Amino acid sequence: MVSTHISAYCGICRLILGVAIVIVNHLRTVATGLHEILPRFTAMPVELITERLLIQPNRVFIIPAHRDLHVLNGEFRLKPISKPRGWPDVITVFLRSLTKHWDGKLVAVIVSGYDGDGAAALCGIKEVGGITIAQKLETAGQPDMPESAIESGCVDFVLSPEDIARKLSRIARPRSRAK
């Protein structure tokens, strides 16, 4: 059985969208195993992020434990976790870094999880022209994070994991130009 947040990731990762997919898991006390699980569900390379790793399309990147994630000059930057006690805010830290240092299209997706990590940065994503998506509460094993995202007032779409994958496919697909 695959948990709800893993199934959301898997639906997204089955697609080859021509974009980089970055999964920021906010569990700070345990190492993630997603870089070992997700390769079974995608043809894209899945990498555990290292310092100065180049951000490339058609890859899935996973944050390592005990780190805040930033971007600068098209590379990932890892820093010691800024909030070592209480619920982490690594998703918020990453999304805020994207709004400051990323030139491309931004889509932030908040799925099942505890607390409200990520919600505080969603309005910033929208302010720079990005798109925000939250998982439907009734499909989330732990609805705190998507609920906080929705309550921020800065979510464009509230979707099931399957619909999130479809929406991302439509967003990433190049639009044909009218002649």
Image (cartoon, helix red, strand yellow):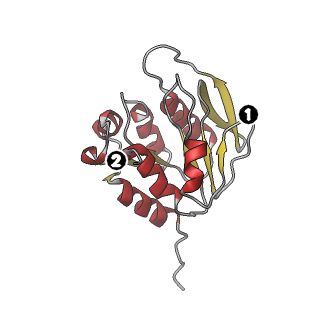
In the picture shown, does residue 107 fall above or below 50? below
Residue annotated with mark 1: 51
Residue annotated with mark 2: 135
Distance between the alpha carbons at the discs numbered 1 and 2: 30 Å
Q: Residue at x 53, y 30 (%)?
A: 93
Which residue reaches farthest front? 1
In the picture shown, does residue 121 fall above or below 8? above
Amino acid at the residue labelled 1: Glu
Residue 56 in view: yes
Q: Residue at x 48, y 26 (%)?
A: 89
Which residue reaches farthest bottom? 179
Amino acid at the residue labelled 2: Gln
Q: Name which of mark 1 and mark 2 comes first in the sequence.
A: 1
Looking at the picture, tell me which residue is in the foreground, 38 or 142: 38
In the picture shown, does residue 78 fall above or below 81? below
Query: At which x and y percent is residue 54?
Result: 73, 45
User: Left or right of 158: which side holds 61?
Assistant: right
SS for callout 2:
strand
